[in-house]
Image (spheres, rainbow, N blue to C red):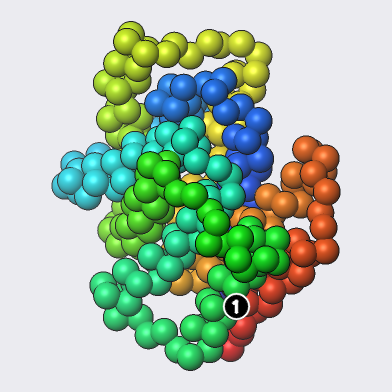
Amino acid sequence: MNNKTKGIIFALTATLLWSVNMVIASGIKGHIPPVGLAFWRWTIACIAFAPFALKSTIRNRVVLKKKIRYLMLTAVLGITIFNTLIYFAGRTTSAVNLSLLAISIPLFIVAISRIIFKEKISGKRLIGIATIIFGVIVLITKGSPQDLLQLNFSIGDLLMLIACFLFACYTILVRMKPIELPSKAFLFSVFVLGALFLFPFYLCEHLFFTKVIFDTKTILITSYVGVFASLVSFFLWNEAIRLIGTYKTAIIYYLIPVFSGILAYFFLNQVIVLNQIISMGIIISGLFITNRK
């Protein structure tokens, strides 16, 4: 299996795991406070990753110390703030609006890559991106363009838009990872720093606002988001960026609404209508256009 194939598979798997996370999140709104969920998510990810990454992290401690500012910035953007903002956004806006705003992540990545790395955006890629965006709009408006004008935006929408921009910045920072820093040591350091930065906010939420109730549902949810939607997905996403670049990795992210729709059909008994099938076909066609040589 060549690097391109592996990179595409890694990006697809990461996107699928995040899609499962979105389906789960739709069923736990209000059950777990946002900072508490974010803190325990990354704490579990650190604990699960430690046996595999601790040795490499200790061995590369000199490099980590030299790059500590870079690691702190990456952790704050991709771990501490990004996911926490999404949990806050989900409390004050609809899933439809979140889906609409999520398509800005690849656009931010392409724009920033163009500015920083001088990556060219060919006419074929622009057509592919336009096709994908059209497919997503068809999906969230159910084929009725006038519905797009009737969407109401709130503070949650602004938080989600900020979160999307920060994840795009995180993706760019991952591409700039020093070559002498192994992937395991890098990811573990970012996870630990991100969790540490979250701790004061979690403590404040726990003492003065809402406590996390560790019932069976909470344990199962935090275990999944900690291991699969955090550890596994971020490792695969970072490796995909290394293997196929930020642009192709970002474009695959557009499959989230496709995966989420299919998963919702099987696990939440939500019916897939003709409009959704058509929009999925448009999105996949756009992916083929943008990745076709």
Tell whether 282 sits left or right of 61: right
Locate residue 61, reporting x and y percent.
25, 39
Locate residue 256, reporting x and y percent.
61, 55
Residue in the image at 33% along x and 8% along y:
207
How many numbered circles does the render carry?
1
Tell whether 222 sits left or right of 267: left
**Element at badge 1?**
helix
**Three-letter amino acid code of the residue under disc 1:** Thr
Residue 187 in sight from this viewpoint: no
Q: Is 224 drawn above or below residue 168 in the view shown?
A: above
Task: Quarter of the image for the C terminus: give it.
Answer: bottom right
Q: Is 219 drawn above or below residue 253 in the view shown?
A: above
Residue in the image at 38% along x and 42% along y:
155
Q: Is 27 drawn above or below residue 212 in the view shown?
A: below
Locate residue 79, reporting x and y percent.
37, 40
Q: Quadrant of residue 187?
A: top left
Task: Quarter of the image for the N terminus: give it.
Answer: bottom right
Tell whether 156 sits left or right of 15: left
Residue in the image at 30% along x and 34% along y:
193
Q: Which residue is mark 1?
A: 131
Locate residue 129, reporting x and y percent.
53, 76
Q: In front here: 191 or 131?
A: 131
Q: Quadrant of residue 53?
A: top left
